[in-house]
Structures are given as C-alpha cells and as structure tokens.
Image: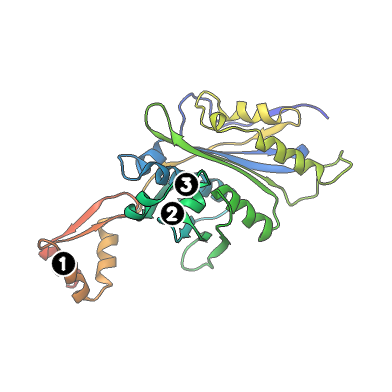
Amino acid sequence: MTKIHQTESGTDTGREFGDFVQSFQVDALGVRGRLVRLGDSVEEITGGGRYPKDVAELLAETMALGTALASGLKYDGVFTLQAQGNGPVKILLADLTSGGDIRGYAQFNADVLAETKDTGGGLVPRLLGGGHLAFTVDQGPETDRYQGITELTGATLADCAQTYFRDSEQLETAIVLTARRADDGAMRAAAFVVQKMPDAGPGGFDDPLEPWREAAVLTSTVTAKELLDADLVPADLLYQMFHERGVRVFESMPLRHACRCSEDRVATTLASFPRTEIEAMREDGVITVTCEFCGNDYVFDNDAVERLFA
C-alpha cells in the first residue's frame, strides 16, 4: 500500500495550545476521527479557584469529550453532554453550539467531596458514583430532540462513552481523554476519538475486523503528554500515528468559551415564576441570580422587579 500523508488547508500550525477540533480520516483503515484541544476556553470555566482540582479536571474532560462527540455530527443548534450521579459531584454539563461556542459547569457538594477518599480508582466512580451519561442534540422548537443515554459503568468518561457507542449505536469507537494543569497553572484538556466508518470495509485485509483492530491499537498508543503538547501540532501527531496507512487532515474548527446568559434571559425566567416565589428570593432588598456556567451575577432591585411584572 502506498504510504501517503495528505493535508488539506486550515490545519493548525502554530505553537500555541489553542482551542479547536481537528477532523481526520484514515481511508486505508476505514476510520474517521477528531482531535480536540481546549486551552483558554476550559481555563476560563475552571480557573480562578472555582472548582477543586479533581472536579476541575473531570469538568475539563467532560468539555473535551462533548466537543469531540458533537463535532462528529451534522447539526444546527446545541449539543449537550451531561453526567448526573449520586456522588459528591451531582452534575457535569458541557454544551457546544454548531458555531463553536462552548461552555460548561459542575454542581458538587463541597462537604461530601472533602470526606471522599482517593482510593486510586477512576474519577467517575469516586466523584459521580452511580448515575447516567446523556447526549442531547437540540436544533430548535420545530425539530425533534435526539438523545442517547448510558449508565456510568466505567472508571472514566471515555469508558462510559465507548460503552454507549458499542451497545446503543453498534459503532466501534476508541476514545482517549485527558485534562490537567500546565506548568503555568492553566487548565488544558484534550480528546482523541476514532470511529469505524459505517461504509464497506477497506480491501487488502484477510480478516474484515483487522483494520479496526489496528486503528484501535494505534489509538491506544497516543499519550496524555502528546495530546497536551503545544509543540506537537495536530498534523504531525496524526502523521506520527498513521503514516504507514496515510491520513487525511481536514480544516480545523476554532472553539471559544461563550456563555449564552443575558439580563433579558434571566428576567424572562424570573417572570415565569409566581410573584410570591420571586419575593421570597430577596436578600438585603435585592434578588441576585448567578449564572451556573459563567458565574455572572444579575441583580434585580425593587424597580427591576416591578418591571418584571408590569
């Protein structure tokens, strides 16, 4: 087989870590995949001491995984990945718009978390416990929502997602996830996802399962250090992994942290509650609503409350 390395315009060639998703395809093995790197976007969400270390890393992995899964779909709207458990971390949520805006948050019980011992197991059973992982695609009120759900049965989010695709979608999938703080203290996250294409398998193999097994083995060789290495640009990493089979690298999609909250949206939500409930929210004469995604506070004084019900 001819050894080739094909690159199309738009691949990332700089040394900054960046925020992007890079799609690729290995025709000889019948697989396609995505490489996700999150820098500033995930730091803006997890930085500033808002979350404890383990919660911040798990949320960062959730954002990387959600981005990797969303970028494999064609949709016009919002893709949401949500993990809900009965452990110290109750909710992990990340969503990505079709335009590349990403946001996320974690809901946790600080007291229970402080009492939770690190027994050396995975973050999922230790922090989330039992529960489920849900994927949702919302393309607006005039369309049906797509949703997939799987139990939190693995040690990592990658394990849970792979179980979902194998059991519910019958789609062979290999996922590598990582998140950690860099030497400068900023959070970095990455995801590497490879999936078997549903088309007819590539020729030249005696065993029809051999191409996927090879792709899965190659995927397992990628390390957290490589995924988080800003000096190792995506095209080079992919060529390093698949150069014997040939890899096509497509145009990358830039990502950014952008919350969709606004004073008007908060006011509309408040106005949907009975006034008695709204009045019960007052503290020191004002009502303060904090966005769970970005932490922005929206303060409503007496005049603002009156306008809500005018």
Q: Position of residue 169 (x, y in %)?
A: 67, 59
Query: By what rule are the colours in the image chosen?
Result: rainbow
Which secondary structure lies at badge 3? helix
**Inter-mark Cα distance, 2 to 3:** 9 Å
Q: Nearer the viewer, mark 1 or mark 2?
A: 2
Residue appearing at x 54%, y 68% in the figure: 144
Q: Which mark is residue 63?
A: 3
On the rendered image, what quadrant is the N terminus found in? top right
Question: Tag 3 or tag 2, which sits nearer the N-term?
Answer: 3
- State the residue position of label 1: 305
Q: Nearer the viewer, residue 157 or 137?
A: 157
Which secondary structure lies at badge 2? strand
How many marks can you see? 3
**Inter-mark Cα distance, 1 to 2:** 31 Å
Q: Which mark is residue 285?
A: none
Q: Residues within 10 Å of mark 3 (few under 14, many from 20)?
A: many
Q: Position of residue 221 (x, y in %)?
A: 66, 33
**Inter-mark Cα distance, 1 to 3:** 35 Å
Given the image, on which type of amino acid does mark 3 rest? Met
Q: Residues within 10 Å of mark 2 (few under 14, many from 20)?
A: many
156 over 265 or under it: above or below? above
- State the residue position of label 2: 92
Q: Left or right of 106: which side holds 192?
A: right
Question: Tag 2 or tag 1, which sits nearer the N-term?
Answer: 2
On the rendered image, what quadrant is the C terminus found in? bottom left
Figure quadrant of residue 269: bottom left
Q: Nearer the viewer, mark 2 or mark 3?
A: 2
194 over 93 or under it: above or below? above
Q: Residues within 10 Å of mark 1 (few under 14, many from 20)?
A: some
